[in-house]
Image: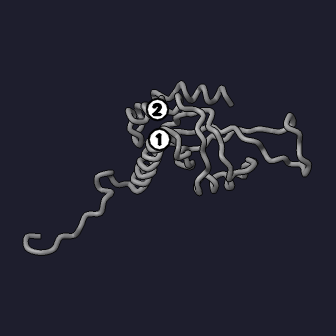
């Protein structure tokens, strides 16, 4: 999995320059700052939990706090993605000793996570999440950003 993450990181610059959803300058800056401030404590939001359940993830304690170890940019398809190492649920009924525990990695969009509010980049991450969700909604609706706001109908003289 680490080789795949390294390959994705190598493609980051070309993905940023061709991005139509994210602002390349802001995103590049945020990516650099996130890398410096690892690990980041996160929880899954409603969309993230729904995604995990739809994928039948074997993640143990889905409602817990997780720490982001790796960050990858996947372009318009996924934006900034966080890699989270976590303990897997055992398929057997018996509990394992610490050395027998299985671990997995979930790679999930930053928009499906809640970041610890005490983290120094929490406000910038929240701003990125809002901008990205809005840009995706606009892209899916087929309208331009400037046309996303409803125009008021004018009535009266000269209309």
**Which quadrant: the N terminus?**
top right
Real-space Cα distance between discs 1 and 2? 8 Å
**Would you name the residue on which mark 1 appears?**
76
Q: Residue furthest right?
A: 94
Q: Position of residue 118 (x, y in %)?
A: 53, 43
**Which quadrant: the C terminus?**
bottom left
Q: Position of residue 11 (x, y in %)?
A: 51, 27
Q: Residue furthest left?
A: 158
Q: Nearer the viewer, residue 135 or 36?
A: 36
Classify residue 116 by image quadrant. Answer: top right
Q: In the rendered view, does 60 fall on the left or right side of 156? A: right
Residue drawn at (63%, 40%) of the image? 107
Q: In the rendered view, does 3 fall on the left or right side of 102? A: left
* Secondary element at image label 1: helix
Q: In the rendered view, does 94 fall on the left or right side of 111? A: right
Residue drawn at (38%, 32%) of the image? 25
Categorize mark 1 by other alpha carbons within 10 Å: few (<14), some (14-19), many (20+). some
> Of label 1 and label 2, which has the lower sequence position?
2
Circles 1, 2 touching at the beta carbon (< 8 Å) = yes
Q: Nearer the viewer, residue 116 or 55?
A: 116
Q: Position of residue 144 (x, y in %)?
A: 32, 51
Q: Nearer the viewer, residue 88 or 39?
A: 39
Q: Nearer the viewer, residue 60 or 47?
A: 60
Categorize mark 2 by other alpha carbons within 10 Å: few (<14), some (14-19), many (20+). some
Q: In the rendered view, does 134 fall on the left or right side of 71? A: left
Q: Position of residue 146 (x, y in %)?
A: 28, 52
**Would you name the residue on which mark 2 appears?**
15
Residue drawn at (29%, 56%) of the image? 147
């Amino acid at each position: 999995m680490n080789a795949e993450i390294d390959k994705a990181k190598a493609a980051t610059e070309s993905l940023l320059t061709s991005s139509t959803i994210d602002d390349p300058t802001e995103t590049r800056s945020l990516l650099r700052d996130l890398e410096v401030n690892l690990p980041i404590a996160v929880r899954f939001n409603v969309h993230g939990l729904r995604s995990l359940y739809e994928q039948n993830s074997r993640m143990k304690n889905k409602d817990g706090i997780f720490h982001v170890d790796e960050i990858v940019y996947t372009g318009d398809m996924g934006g900034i993605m966080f890699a989270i190492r976590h303990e897997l649920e055992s398929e057997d009924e018996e509990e394992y000793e610490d050395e027998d525990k299985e671990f997995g990695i979930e790679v999930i969009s930053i928009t499906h996570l809640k970041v610890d509010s005490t983290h120094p980049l929490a406000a910038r991450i929240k701003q990125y999440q809002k901008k990205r969700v809005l840009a995706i909604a606009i892209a899916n609706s087929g309208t331009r950003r400037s046309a996303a706001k409803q125009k008021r109908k004018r009535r009266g003289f000269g209309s």
